Image (cartoon, rainbow, N blue to C red):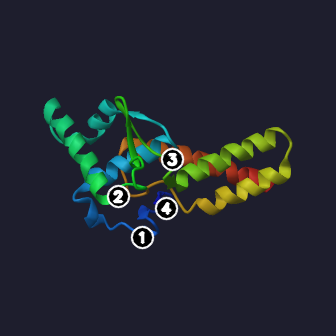
Amino acid sequence: MRSLRIHTLGRCELTLDDRLIPDEAWRGPHAKRLLLILVSRGRGTPVPRDEMIDLLRSSGNQNRALTDFYGILHQIQAVLGRPADGGSAFLRLQGARVLLDAEYCWADCWGFDEAVSSAKRYETYGQGEEARRVLAEARALYRGPFLPEVREGWAEAKRHSVQRQFVWVEQRDKRL
């Protein structure tokens, strides 16, 4: 089974089947940017197509923007291919929403978010040993701020969220 791994904490790297995808493969910034926007929203979170079009829009023409959006989806498909023979695409369209298929895609920030949520749950239920274990997982995943070189609202919002969570991890690590 093919897999797409996306590293966003402290760096930006996309690997397909353990091979780094070079920036030149994307034929422009929008295809990779679309994937990163979807990653920033969370694991398996569908994003309205019109919202994605607004974030990616390079043209003031609404009809042209929709055509550009579908062109970007085709670029992504050309770079990534399909995860399995006859399987679904890494990128899914569900009605008027688009998402990354979490069955085939993994992102370090998703793992970090899940580890922090688990640590909070374990701490709430007094399971200190389990909380320490997942705090260690969160610490191992955190290699720096979310997409530090991207200066757009969607990236900055996620960066602040991850930073708040990392501060919480450090504080809890000292208490446990």
Looking at the picture, how far across and down is residue 33, in whole percent? 33, 50
Name the amino acid type tagged 1. Arg
> Is residue 67 shown left or right of residue 116?
left
Q: Which residue is mark 3?
A: 102
- Above or below 44: residue 147: below
Q: Amino acid at mark 4?
A: Gly
Cα–Cα span, label 4 and label 2: 23 Å
Say which element carries label 1. Answer: strand
Q: Which mark is residue 19?
A: 1
**Which label's residue is closer to the chain start, 3 or 2?**
2
Q: Mark 4 or 2, which is nearer the eye?
A: 2
x and y, in percent, of residue 1 in the image: 49, 59
Is residue 75 something that shows in the picture?
Answer: yes
- Secondary structure of residue under mark 2: helix
Inspect this view and state whether residue 176 appears. Answer: no
Which mark is first along the chain, 1 or 2?
1
Q: Are marks 4 and 3 in contact (CB under 8 Å)?
A: no
Q: Position of residue 162 (x, y in %)?
A: 55, 48
State the CA–CA distance, disc 3 to disc 1. 19 Å
Q: Which of disc 1 and disc 4 is earlier in sequence?
A: 4
Please indicate whether residue 113 sits to the left or right of residue 173 in the image. Answer: left
Q: Any mark on residue 80, and which? A: 2
Q: Position of residue 21 (x, y in %)?
A: 36, 66
Picture quadrant of residue 11: bottom left
Q: Earlier in the sequence, mark 4 or mark 2?
A: 4
Callout in the foreground (4, 3): 3
